[in-house]
Amino acid sequence: MLPSESVDARTQSALLAAIVTLALAVAMLLRKGRTRLWTAFALLNVALLVYELGDFLAGVLHVAWPLRLTLVAAGFVPSAVLGFLVEFQGDAGRGLGLRRLGTASGLVTRGADPDDRRYRPLLKFRCRCEAKNCGGVIRA
């Protein structure tokens, strides 16, 4: 356990998840004869690493900027998941549009603050994009 009293179980689990995803990403990137599937899996783990690292830093530092880091990573996780699933299915050409849509939704929410009313239309757009992505994955 970390010695600080302000570190709760959620913060510690975020640190553990960040360590595990870092280990998986490094292991996949250091493989000899790495395929596109392993690279897509490593990129997925890097996106999850950034998300969990932001969550951990927000719990430890009690400042706002790690939450923005978490929000940025959360925007790119769907694209990374789609990229991995498309490579796993072995049909990279068909999923290109889904990956572009996932990347676009990640870019839209990159700097959005969920409490700011000006960004609510962007977050609604992202939810529609993610719903479309999920439908595309189910159909694939």
Image (cartoon, rainbow, N blue to C red):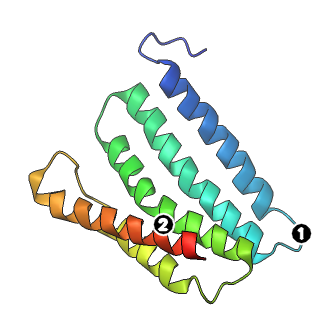
| Residue drawn at (17%, 64%) of the image | 121
Q: Secondary structure at mark 2?
A: helix
Look at the picture and state if 68 lies above or below 119: above
Return the x and y of residue 19 as percentages of the image width and height.
66, 39
Label for residue 134? 2
Q: Which residue is mark 1?
A: 32
| Residue drawn at (17%, 57%) of the image | 120
- Kindly give the residue lying farthest to the left in the view shown: 117
Q: Amino acid at mark 2?
A: Cys
Circles 1 and 2, Cβ within 8 Å, touching? The answer is no
On the rendered image, what quadrant is the C terminus found in? bottom right
Q: Secondary structure at mark 1?
A: loop
| Residue drawn at (54%, 56%) of the image | 47
Q: Earlier in the sequence, mark 1 or mark 2?
A: 1
* 1 vs 2, front mark: 2
> What is the crowding at mark 2: few (fewer than 14 residues within 10 Å), some, or many (at least 20)?
some
Please identify the quarter of the rendering in which residue 74 is found: bottom left
